Amino acid sequence: MRHADPELPPGPRIPTALQGAGFVVNRRRVLHQLSARYGPVFSMSLPTFGDTVFVSDPALAKQVYLAKSDVVVNMRPNLGRTLGPGSIFAVEGDDHRRQRRLLTPPLHGKRITEYEAIVAEEFASEAANWPIGRPFPTMEPMMRITLNVILRAVFGANGAHFDELRRLMPSLVAAGSRLSTLPALPTVGGRLNPQTRFLAQRAEYNTVVTSLIREARADPALADRRDILALMLQSTYDDGAAMTDAEISDELLTLLAAGHETTATTLAWAVERLTRHPQILADLAAEAETDEKALRTATIHEVQRSRPVIDLFGRHVVADSLALGDYRIPRGTNVLVAISLLHDDSRQFKDPERFDPGRFIDVKPPQAWLPFGGGTRRCIGAAFAHMEMDVVLREMLRTFTPATTTAADERWHSRGVAYAPARGGRMAVTRRR
C-alpha cells in the first residue's frame, strides 16, 4: 500500500554525525551493509546532504532519473559548487536543456572519430617513457594522456597556455573532487585551508581560460576551427543569444575536469583487472591486431560494471513529494542511485564478483548498468570517454605485452567523488617486436 503522506524509507537512527563519519570513511561498505539490512530503498541522515534516500533497484532508479524537472533537480550539493554556476552540473530546467543542446554535437557522432588520432598520438607520446620490465602505477600516465586529449579537443592546439593548464588541472581537479563531498568551508586559515587553495587555483584557471577565449574570438580563422571552444563561440541558444565568457569558462572546466579524471581512472582499473585475468588479456591482444573490437567494448563495459569510478548519482526533490515505489519522498530530500549496489546485485548480473566481459558480448547493457548515470543528466561525454578508452586499450595492446600477476586485487581508494585503484593500477610491460 502506498503511504498517504511523504515519508522516508527505513534506515539507521544513530546520530547524523556518526552516519556521516561512516559514509566518509568507507561509503561502499556502509551502503552494502545497509542494503543487506533494509533492502533496495533505505535512508540516511548525512552532514552536508541532509536526509538522503538510496536506491538500488533498476526500476526505481529509472523513476528517479526520469522524474520531471518540476519534481526533482540535480542533487544538492553537486559538482556545480566547485565547477561554477555556469557548469552543466549547476544549471537547471530550460537553462540545462539549452546548454546540453549546445554541448552535445562536438561530443557525439562523426566528430568523435576526428579525435581518435589525437588519442593515439597522446598515448604513443606518453608510452614512449614507460619503463620496461618494471611494475609502475598506470593511473598518472593515463591522467596525462586523457588530460592532453581533452585539452587538444577543447582548444585545438598546444602552447604556453596549455602548459599552464597541464600543470594546474590535476591538483585543481583533485581539490575540487574532495571539496564537493564536504560542507562549505569558511575562507580562513590562509593556504592551510583547502577551500582557500582551491579558490586560488580556480582564479589561475580563469585567468588562463579568459585569455584563450579572447584569442579565439579574435582568430580570423575561427569559422574553420573544429575544436570545442570554437564551436561554443559560434553557437547560439534558440533565442539567438550566445554563451557568456563566464558560462564558457565554467563549461570548459567541467569538460576538462569530468573529461579526463574518470576516464583515466577507469583505464587504470582496466589494467588492474586485465593483469589478473590472463586469458581475457590474451584474447584482447589477439583482437587488437584486427579491426574487430567486440571483446574490447565488452571489456570496457565490464570494467565499468565491476569497478565503477563514480558510485552515486541522484536528484533533489523540489516538489511536495516524489513517488518512489511504495514511498512518497518528501521535499528537500536527496535521492541517490547507488551504482555500485546495482552493479554488484546478483539479480541483475550473474556471479557479479566474477570479472566476465562475456556478459556484454553482442549484448546491450541492461537497465541496471549505469556508470554514466541516466536521464537528462546522463554524462554528456559518455561517447567521448568510451572512444578514448577503446583507443588507449587498443594501442597499449598493439605496443606492449602486459605481464600478468597473481597479486591480490587492488583496494578501492576514495579520491572524494571518484574511486581509484589504491596502488594506481600497477603493471609491468615488455615491448612487442
Image (spheres, rainbow, N blue to C red):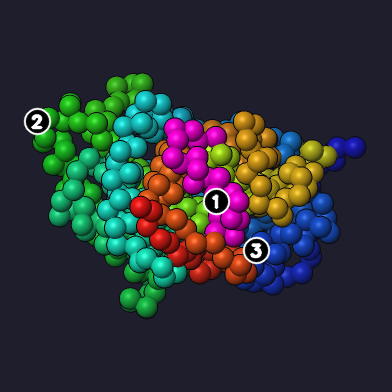
Residue type beneath disc 1: Leu
Do callouts 2 and 1 mark residues in contact (Cβ within 8 Å)?
no
The part of the image, by quadrant, that contains residue 220 is top left
Q: Secondary structure at mark 2?
A: loop
Instruction: Note whether 362 is above or below 273 in the view shown.
Output: above
> What's the mark number on residue 220?
2
In the rendered view, does 100 fall on the left or right side of 317? left
Q: CA distance from mark 3 to mark 1?
A: 31 Å
Amino acid at the residue labelled 3: Arg
Instruction: Give the magenta-colored segment's residue range.
Output: 273-294
Position of residue 309 relative to residue 428, above or below, is above
Against 84, is 92 above or below?
above
CA separation, marks 2 and 3? 51 Å
Q: Residues within 10 Å of mark 2 (few under 14, many from 20)?
A: few
Q: First in sequence, mark 2 or 1: give its number.
A: 2
Q: At 18% from the left edge and 48% from the top edge, which residue is drawn?
A: 158
> In the drawing, what numbered circle is on residue 402?
none
Q: Is residue 284 magenta?
A: yes
Q: Position of residue 38 (x, y in %)?
A: 83, 55
Residue picked out by circle 3? 27
Residue at 21% in and 58% down = 164
Q: Quadrant of residue 192?
A: bottom left
* Label at residue 281: 1
Task: Say whether residue 267 is magenta.
Answer: no
Q: Residue furthest front?
A: 433
